[in-house]
């Protein structure tokens, strides 16, 4: 298969994966409420998944050197599908948390493998563009996955999970045959002792000393903060639509699809322009600032039209900022360290998501708009971190 044809097939399969990965999201509040669980469980359940995602992301980033991204995708997509079936039929808080933690073992591997495959296989001149496509597909297809899942949930809540699991397993097989091997060696060549070392998630964090710098610290801080803000905002948004605005899961899906369309347009125009034509560090500051001010708008205004409008800006700003930040991180990494660095990138996303989901879950029960206030504050800190990176690089050049 030719280079361009292979990547077209890869991105098409990514679309299907990201659609399916979000079929269950609009019906998850219904599952929690059907079991008469506390409201904070929506945050705890997501945080449980993000916790194991956080721990295993660097491991997947390193193990891809030995088994290649396509085998990682095969394992992780199948594992994620099984985890979703477990979650769908869980009946207690404990089983829900276990199912979410099991899912997190594999979700980190999927997204790290996406990034490492693109970084390893794409030509240098295509890397920034393809990373933008990857982030765009994730945000846009996820939004339309919400819509499809919402309509499936109107038929049956469990149907969303069943269709999701079947699609994820089918996608796993597609990835295996579409992707070309990109690992540097065979798993058979790795000793048992070395494999155990690679399997230790904390070893990967210790190994960060080989690439960590002030620049990386500031960029990873931005990544943690924008994912903290976005995850908390998104979790509260889903419940706010249902609890305060009285909208069903299908309407939730329609709103998210509209957000996805706008995010797609922003990524294919604004994002590429920012990466190729602007001073990217300054643009990153402006993107995060736009998200912070829009979150403030969501907090202040109660009118449904203004609430949705400001929410769309928050979502679109985040979807553009992710590929911009990915490009900045990839550009800072040395070629030999890119797998580990991109694994850390995904890990810091998960760390932010853990904090955001837990915080939103607990403070939503205090007041439904507190998570949006929190988003404003966290994005404000993200602005400071982005300014810090811009200042640091300016001094470094001087």
Image (cartoon, rainbow, N blue to C red):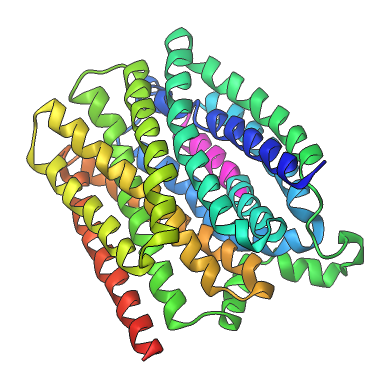
**Foreground pick, 201 / 128:** 128
For the image, the number of numbered tags is 0
Characterize the magenta stretch by its predominant secondary structure: helix
**Foreground pick, 134 / 18:** 134
Q: Give the magenta-colored segment's residue range.
A: 92-105
Q: Quadrant of the N terminus?
A: top right
- The answer to whether any part of residue 30 appears in the image is yes
Q: Is residue 13 above or below residue 136?
A: above
Q: Quadrant of the C terminus?
A: bottom left
Going 29% across and 50% down the picture, which residue do you hit? 359
Please, which residue is most extreme toward the top here?
Answer: 155
Q: Position of residue 300 (x, y in %)?
A: 8, 42
- The answer to whether any part of residue 357 appears in the image is no
Q: Is residue 397 left or right of residue 233?
A: right
Going 17% across and 45% down the picture, which residue do you hit? 370
- Residue 102 magenta-drawn? yes
Q: Is residue 53 left or right of residue 384?
A: right
**Foreground pick, 155 / 52:** 155
Please, which residue is most extreme toward the right here?
Answer: 188
Residue 226, picture quadrant:
bottom left
- Residue 223 magenta-drawn? no
Q: Is residue 108 left or right of residue 375?
A: right
Going 33% across and 39% down the picture, which residue do you hit? 235
Q: Position of residue 314 (x, y in %)?
A: 27, 44
Residue 18, picture quadrant:
top right
Q: Position of residue 22 (x, y in %)?
A: 49, 31
Please, which residue is most extreme toward the front here?
Answer: 277
Q: Is residue 10 above or below residue 191?
A: above
**Foreground pick, 228 / 334:** 334
Q: Position of residue 205 (x, y in %)?
A: 57, 72
């Amino acid at each position: 298969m030719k280079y361009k044809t292979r990547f077209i097939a890869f991105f098409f399969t990514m679309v299907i994966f990201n659609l399916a990965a979000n079929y269950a999201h609009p019906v998850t509040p219904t599952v929690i409420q059907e079991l008469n669980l506390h409201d904070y469980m929506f945050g705890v359940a997501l945080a449980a998944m993000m916790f194991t995602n956080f721990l295993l992301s660097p491991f997947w980033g390193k193990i891809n050197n030995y088994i290649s991204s396509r085998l990682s995708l095969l394992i992780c997509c199948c594992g994620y599908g099984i985890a979703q079936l477990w979650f769908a039929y869980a009946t207690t808080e404990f089983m829900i948390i276990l199912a979410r933690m099991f899912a997190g073992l594999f979700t980190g591997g999927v997204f790290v493998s996406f990034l490492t495959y693109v970084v390893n296989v794409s030509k240098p001149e295509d890397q920034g563009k393809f990373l933008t496509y990857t982030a765009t597909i994730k945000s846009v297809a996820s939004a339309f996955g919400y819509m499809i899942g919402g309509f499936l949930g109107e038929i049956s809540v469990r149907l969303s999970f069943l269709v999701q699991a079947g699609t994820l397993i089918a996608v796993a097989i597609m990835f295996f045959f579409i992707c070309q091997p990109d690992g540097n060696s065979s798993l058979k060549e790795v000793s048992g002792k070395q494999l155990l070392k690679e399997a230790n998630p904390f070893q990967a964090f210790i190994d960060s000393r080989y690439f960590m710098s002030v620049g990386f610290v500031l960029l990873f801080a931005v990544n943690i903060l924008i994912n903290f803000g976005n995850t908390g905002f998104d979790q509260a948004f889903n419940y706010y639509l249902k609890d305060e605005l009285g909208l069903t899961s299908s309407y939730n899906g329609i709103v998210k699809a509209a957000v996805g369309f706008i995010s797609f347009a922003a990524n294919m125009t604004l994002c590429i322009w920012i990466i190729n034509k602007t001073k990217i560090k300054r643009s990153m500051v402006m993107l995060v600032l736009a998200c912070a001010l829009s979150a403030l708008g969501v907090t202040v205004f109660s009118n449904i039209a203004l609430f949705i409008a400001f929410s769309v800006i928050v979502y679109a700003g985040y979807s553009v900022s992710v590929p911009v930040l990915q490009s900045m991180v990839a550009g800072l990494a040395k070629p030999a360290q890119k797998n580990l660095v991109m694994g850390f990138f995904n890990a810091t996303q998960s760390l932010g998501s853990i904090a955001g989901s837990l915080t939103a879950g607990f403070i939503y029960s205090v007041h439904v708009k507190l998570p949006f206030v929190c988003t404003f504050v966290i994005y404000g800190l993200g602005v400071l971190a982005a300014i810090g990176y811009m200042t640091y690089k300016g001094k470094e050049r001087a």
